[in-house]
Every structure is written in structure tokens, then in C-alpha cells.
Amino acid sequence: MAKIGGGKVNQERSEAMSQQEEIRDKKILIADDEAHILHVVTMKLSNAGYKVITAMDGEEALELCQSEMPDLLITDYQMPYLTGLELCKHLREDERTARIPVLMLTARGFNIESHEMAKAGIDDVISKPFSPREILRKVENLIKHASTAAKQGPEY
């Protein structure tokens, strides 16, 4: 007699639940001096299950990175006190924060040279205006890549 309800469905459900649990453990810091950007991105990521903390300027973002150790930083390029680029450089100089993945938000038409991105440790860039769905997709990719790299060890 054939077994009804196959193991594949249960395995897929289990994997989906495991991914959802992994998301809930992830903390994302969003740094932007525009309140509406913070609100939109916070809502999208919170609804997806991420823990979200926010900062309104580069100095506050640096302090939160050092105290909260987020799994990902989303930062605007142009902010008061420290630009997003300066913030990233400070993070890379600190052993505790050097491996935090960074998604940089920029104004449309503003380009960051690839050598600048590499030097500052910026993992990806997205131009404003953007869709919340696009932010979520990039966040998921960066989190997945960071998790894989952590499991693989320092050589990855």
C-alpha cells in the first residue's frame, strides 16, 4: 500500500520553517536621515520577520553597530555626522564589526566606484527610489551569503 502525504512535502515544510526561524534570529540596522525611508524599510523587513533597529545619522549607526552587532547594515550614503562611506570604513577598522554585511542606499544618478565599494566593504548598492520588494530581495541574498560564509569559515 502506498503512503499518502509523501515525505517530500514534510521536508519542504520543515525547511521553510527552519528558514523562517533563521530570519527571526537576524537583526538588521537601518541608518537613514529620512524618516519615511526608515519607516518603509522597517515595515517591509519587520513584516518579513526580521528584528529591525534604526539610526538617524552615521554616528548613531556606528554606536549601534558596536553595541547591537547587527547581522546586516542598510545605510544611506548621505547622512549627518558620518556619511555611509565613512561609517563603513569605521566598521572595517573594528575587528568586532568588520564582517557586518552592508547594503548602501544612494540617490539616483550617484555612483560609487567599485574600488571604493571594495575598500569600504560595501556588499551591495541600491538607488533611491527603490521598491520595498527589491530591498527585501537584496537583504535575503546578503543574509544568505553571510550565513554561508560563516559556515564555510574564513577561507570562503
Image (tube, rainbow, N blue to C red):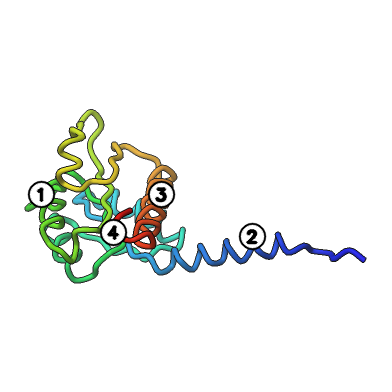
Q: Is residue 125 above or below residue 95?
A: above
The reply, left or right, for residue 48 in relation to residue 58 is: right
Mark 2 / mark 1, whichever is N-terminal = 2
Earlier residue among tags 4 and 3: 3
Label ID, residue 12: 2
| Mark 3 to mark 2 CA distance (whole Å) | 20 Å
Residue at image coords 25%, 61%: 54
Picture quarter containing residue 70? bottom left
Mark 3 = which residue?
141
Horizontally, residue 3 falls left or right of residue 28, namely right
**Label 2, residues with CA under 10 Å away: few <14, some 14-19, many ≥20:** few
Q: CA distance from mark 3 to mark 1?
A: 24 Å
Picture quadrant where residue 27 is located: bottom left
Please name the residue shown 15% across and 57% down the image.
91
- Which of label 4 and label 3 is nearer to you? 4
Whether residues under marks 4 and 1 lie with C-beta atoms below 8 angstroms apart, the answer is no
What's under tag 2, amino acid-wise? Glu
- Residue 16's label in the rendered image is none
Q: Earlier in the sequence, mark 2 or mark 4?
A: 2
Q: Tell me whether the residue at label 4 lies in contact with that at label 3, contact meaning CB atoms closer than 8 angstroms.
A: no
Kind of residue sitting beneath label 1: Glu
Residue type at the position of mark 4: Pro
Closer to the camera, 34 or 48?
48
Callout in the foreground (4, 1):
4
